[in-house]
Image (tube, rainbow, N blue to C red):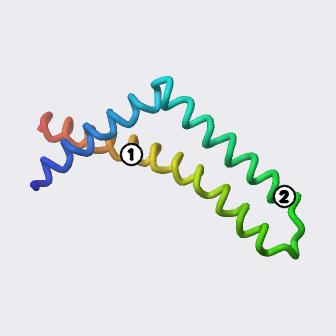
Amino acid sequence: MTDYDLLVEQASAGADIETFKNSNAGRYLYQKAEVDELAALRKLAKADPGDKETIHRLQLEATAPRLAIQWIEEGIRIGKLAKFTLDEAKAE
């Protein structure tokens, strides 16, 4: 795969991810991830500092939705950068 092919693939994937994020299903999942992360963090704030097992479980519970949000945002960001790079190359 050439650098050009990779950029095209990244730009396309980024656009697809952004379209998904803005769809009904994407908005639902994105908002659900935010709500679930916040709920876990609230529970974590109230957890007994000596209860290492509960703290670990709640940390994992908060991490999963945060990762999903990060993957979505990263995919969009990489796609936009790839598109910008392709557009710049065409302009030269």
Quarter residue 43 falls in: bottom right
Q: Which mark is residue 54?
A: none
Whole-percent x and y of residue 62? Answer: 67, 55
- Residues under labels 1 and 2: Cα distance? 31 Å
Q: Is residue 65 left or right of residue 43?
A: left
Quadrant that contains the N terminus:
bottom left
Q: Amino acid at mark 1?
A: Gly
User: Which numbered mark, 1 or 2, is in the foreground of this view?
Assistant: 2
Whole-percent x and y of residue 3? Answer: 14, 54
- Going from N to C along the chain, the mark reached first, 1 or 2, is 2
Residue at coordinates 81% horizontally, 51% vertically from top-left?
42
Residue at coordinates 10% horizontally, 54% vertically from top-left?
2
Q: Amino acid at mark 2?
A: Ala
Whole-percent x and y of residue 79? Answer: 32, 42
* Figure check: 49 above or below 76: below
Q: Secondary structure at mark 2?
A: helix
Q: Which mark is residue 75?
A: 1
Q: Residues within 10 Å of mark 2 (few under 14, many from 20)?
A: few
Q: Residues within 10 Å of mark 1 (few under 14, many from 20)?
A: some
Residue at coordinates 77% horizontally, 73% vertically from top-left?
53
Number of numbered discs: 2
Whole-percent x and y of residue 9? Answer: 21, 44
* Figure check: 40 above or below 53: above
Q: Do labels 1 and 2 touch, CB within 8 Å? A: no
Residue at coordinates 32% horizontally, 33% vertically from top-left?
15
* Figure check: 89 above or below 50: above
- The residue to which callout 2 is attached is 45
* Figure check: 8 above or below 58: above
Q: Secondary structure at mark 1?
A: helix
Quarter residue 44 falls in: bottom right
Q: Is residue 76 left or right of residue 87?
A: right
